[in-house]
Image (cartoon, rainbow, N blue to C red):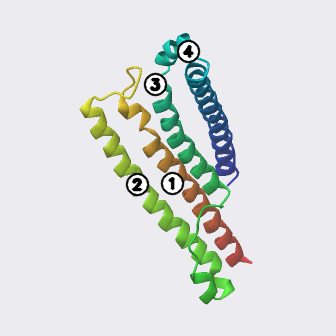
Amino acid sequence: MKLLQRIDNILGRIEGGFVVLFLTAMVVLTFIRITLRALHVHGHFQWANAVMGYFDWAELMVRLLVLWVAFLGASLVTRKQKHIKIDLMSEFLPSRWLPCRELVLSLVCAVVTALMVKASWHYVLMERSFGSTLFLGMPTWIGQMILPAGFFLIFLRFLFRSAEQAVSLVGSRKR
């Protein structure tokens, strides 16, 4: 279990670092575009319009980064078990059964996210075969790699949670 926790902590730090990096890039790129647009429109600086032409890719980049931040954030939220839950069973089940329910739910969520990993991976492969580009010559499939990667990270979190629940359940049965 210590190994899983260590892996989870390392993944969390890496994801958090990327979230900070991507949010910073989003803010900086958006600030540059807004400033250049304001200088051109309100200050009537023609050079601002010319410079803005060099940043025509920035809006698409920010949109792509929103997707990356959303998936990395979803993984971090899943890590902390703060994701959205629809929980009707805990109202009806006796409290001694709740750990079993948690294990089953974690396993079901792991299976569902594993299916999403597979489906999104096939989608990325299909996009790769089309050969389209996003901006600055970057292939579309590279930007879309967050789909299988993000679902895989979430899958790992549910798998780790399942292992924790199973160990906890086995430990409580031995007592």
> Would you identify the image quadrant in which residue 78 lies?
bottom right
Reading the image, the residue beneath label 1 is: 155
Asked if marks 4 and 2 touch (Cβ < 8 Å), the reply is no
Mark 4 or 2, nearer chain start: 4
In this picture, is 5 found above or below 82?
Answer: above
Foreground pick, 48 / 24: 48
Q: Looking at the image, is mark 2 or mark 1 earlier in the sequence?
A: 2
* Label 3 sits on residue: 57
Please indicate whether residue 82 sits to the left or right of residue 41 in the image: right
Residue at which label 2 appears: 116
Specify the quadrant of the image occupied by residue 157.
Answer: bottom right
Dot 3, how many residues are within 10 Å of its Cα: few (below 14), some (14-19), or many (20+)? Answer: some
In terms of depth relative to the viewer, which is nearer, 45 or 55? Answer: 45
At numbered mark 4, what does the secondary structure look like: helix, strand or loop? helix
Residue at horizontal 63 percent and vertical 54 percent from the top: 77
Q: Amino acid at mark 1?
A: Phe
Q: Are marks 2 and 1 in contact (CB under 8 Å)?
A: yes
Residue count near mark 2 (Cα–Cα under 10 Å), binned few <14, some 14–19, many ≥20? some
Q: Quadrant of the C terminus?
A: bottom right
Camera-side mark, 1 or 3: 3
In the rendering, at what x and y percent does residue 92 appear? 60, 89
Disc 4 to disc 2, how far (Cα)?
44 Å
Q: CA distance from mark 3 to mark 2?
A: 29 Å
Residue on which the image places disc 4: 48
Q: Secondary structure at mark 1?
A: helix
Q: CA distance from mark 2 to mark 1?
A: 9 Å
Instruction: Name which quarter of the figure residue 24 lies in.
Output: top right
Residue at image position (56%, 73%) is 86
- Left or right: where does residue 61 sit relative to residue 10? left
Q: Mark 2 is on which residue type?
A: Met
Q: Is residue 93 visible?
A: no
Q: Residue at x 56, y 59 (%)?
A: 158
